[in-house]
């Protein structure tokens, strides 16, 4: 089981740093932390591998949480700015801009 903790720690670190795969890193990190805690409570000869995997899983969990929170904050800011932009311009202004663009490209 110690080898599994180490492998989960490595996978969670690698996947946690790859944007779209951060959710895989989160799942592997949670499982790695739980298994690592179980392995560390046991007296086994491969306690070093379990400790390394446990630490890597904790670091990966922190990284994936930071990435997830920052992505959510960024998405919220973009949505807020898009609403402000949409409220700032009237439909007539947007239609005139589209007409000007179509005239520009038709010439």
Image (spheres, helix red, strand yellow):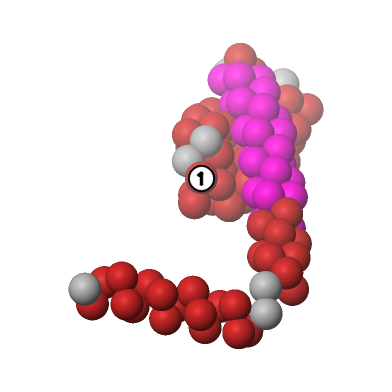
Quadrant in which the N terminus appears: top right
Query: Does 57 lie within the magenta span?
Result: yes
**SS type, badge 1:** helix
- Coordinates of residue 47 in the picture (x, y in percent): 64, 18
Q: Looking at the image, which is closer to me, 95 or 9? A: 95
72, above or below 44, in the image: below
Farthest residue to the right: give it. 41
Residue at point 68%, 66% (across, down): 85
Residue at point 56%, 78% (across, down): 94
Q: Is residue 32 visible?
A: yes
Q: Looking at the image, which is closer to me, 17 or 72? A: 72
Q: In screen coordinates, is 6 left or right of 72?
A: left
Residue at point 51%, 80% (across, down): 96
Which region of the structure is painted magenta? Answer: 49-76
Name the residue beneath numbered marker 1. Answer: 19
Q: In screen coordinates, is 69 left or right of 9?
A: right
Tell me the crowding category of disc 1: few under 14, some 14 to 19, or many 20 or more residues within 10 angstroms, Cα based: few
- Coordinates of residue 44 in the picture (x, y in percent): 65, 21
1, above or below 95, in the image: above
Farthest residue to the left: give it. 107
91, above or below 52, in the image: below
Residue at point 71%, 59% (across, down): 81
- Coordinates of residue 40 in the picture (x, y in percent): 73, 25
Q: What's the magenta bit mostly, secondary-structure-wise?
A: helix
């Amino acid at each position: 089981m110690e080898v599994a903790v180490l492998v989960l720690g490595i996978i969670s670190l690698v996947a946690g740093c790859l944007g779209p795969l951060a959710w895989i890193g989160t799942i592997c990190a949670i499982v790695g932390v739980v298994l690592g805690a179980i392995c560390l409570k046991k007296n086994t000869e491969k306690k070093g591998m379990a400790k390394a995997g446990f630490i890597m899983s904790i670091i990966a969990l922190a990284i994936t949480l930071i990435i997830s929170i920052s992505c959510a904050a960024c998405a919220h800011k973009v949505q807020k700015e898009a609403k402000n932009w949409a409220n700032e311009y009237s439909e007539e202004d947007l239609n005139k801009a589209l007409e000007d663009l179509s005239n520009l490209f038709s010439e």
